[in-house]
Amino acid sequence: MGIWDYEPEDQSEIEYESTEALPGTDEKLAALSARIERGLPLWHPEDRRTYNDSEKIPE
């Protein structure tokens, strides 16, 4: 069945790292899974959201 309305307590974004992984990739899913296991929010404000998020793409 599962818990479908899980919301962890608010966390400071400095308490967990953002990810540069693209949405839908195995790397991104692993990051989300690790966050859930640690009781952290799924989304970090600085997570990469699209391919064009060039701020975090090395030149």
Image (cartoon, rainbow, N blue to C red):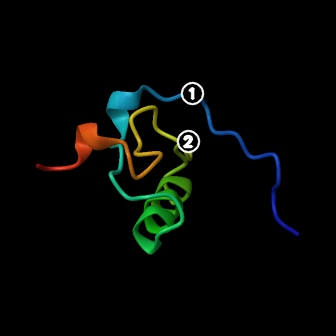
Q: Residue at x 38, y 46 (%)?
A: 52
Q: Residue at x 42, y 58 (%)?
A: 22
The image shows residue 32 at horizontal and vertical percentages of 51, 58
Label 1 sits on residue: 10
Query: Tag 1: residue type?
Result: Asp
The reply, left or right, for residue 54 in relation to residue 51 is left
Classify mark 2: helix, strand or loop: loop
Most foreground residue, 38 or 34:
34
Label 2 sits on residue: 41
From this viewpoint, which residue is outermost toward the bottom?
Answer: 26
Query: Tag 2: residue type?
Result: Pro
Question: Are the residues flagged by discs 2 and 1 in contact, CB closer than 8 Å?
Answer: yes
Check disc 1: other Cα within 10 Å, few if <14, some if 14-19, many if 20+: few
Q: Residue at x 14, y 50 (%)?
A: 58
Classify mark 1: helix, strand or loop: loop
Query: Up-down: is 3 above or below 47?
Result: below
The image shows residue 46 at horizontal and vertical percentages of 39, 35
Location of residue 18 (image quadrant): top left
Most foreground residue, 41 or 21:
21
Check disc 2: other Cα within 10 Å, few if <14, some if 14-19, many if 20+: some
The reply, left or right, for residue 53 in relation to residue 43 is left
Query: Up-down: is 24 above or below 9?
Result: below
